[in-house]
Amino acid sequence: MILTGPEIARQVGSGRIKIEPFDESRLSPNSYDFLLGREICWYEDEVLDCRRENRVTYAPIPDEGMTLRPGKIYLAGTSERMGSEFYVPIIRARSSIARLGLFVHVTADLIDIGSINNWTLQLHAVQPVTIYPEMRIGQVTFWCTEGEIKLYDGKYQNSTRPMPSMIHRDFTAV
């Protein structure tokens, strides 16, 4: 079951959903529009390796915008710190952004229950597209759970900036 916009607002008010800062004007019938943060990063190497830490370059997104190029994955954060210990968030691009050929959070749209962070977005442009800090880029929906809840406590918990992949840690832990 998906929460409606008014129910999202009620749950934010009760503390069961965290959206900081929260702006009621960004509620939709069944989602909340979130903003692109002010920092972005990208991998330095052309070939990425799952068994090692891949080098990244961080940069601010200029107020006058930054053009994303095809053939590269960019990592940017949400402006808001969001999450819930009671509902499962799912994030997607806003349809206006998708219509420009910008994929937001390319393949990992399910956020674990208990993951409360500034979430990292994986951005991929089909053709060159210019983005701006604090623009409405995506939407989050909140879903009810069934069964025992085990909260997320993984390697990306408490992120405050875009986080590159840490899959290499999975190999060293085996």
Image (cartoon, rainbow, N blue to C red):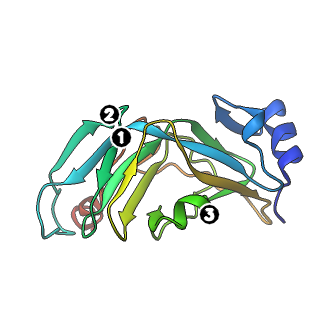
Q: CA distance from mark 1 to mark 3?
A: 20 Å
Q: Position of residue 155 (x, y in %)?
A: 39, 50
Please report whichever mark, 2 or 3, sits nearer to the chain's N-terminal start.
2
At label 3, the amino acid type is Ser
Quarter of the figure with residue 127: bottom left
At label 1, the amino acid type is Gly
Asked if marks 2 and 1 touch (Cβ < 8 Å), the reply is: yes
In this rendering, the count of numbered labels is 3
Q: Residue at x 53, y 59 (%)?
A: 97
Q: Residue at x 77, y 62 (%)?
A: 145
Q: Position of residue 34 (x, y in %)?
A: 60, 44
The reply to whether residue 78 is visible in this rendering is yes
Which secondary structure, mark 2?
loop
Label 1 sits on residue: 65
Q: Is residue 127 above or below residue 32?
A: below
Q: Position of residue 85 (x, y in %)?
A: 69, 46
The reply to whether residue 93 is visible in this rendering is no
- From the viewer's side, name the closer residue of 34 and 148: 34
Q: Which mark is residue 62?
A: 2
Q: CA distance from mark 2 to mark 3?
A: 24 Å
Label 3 sits on residue: 95
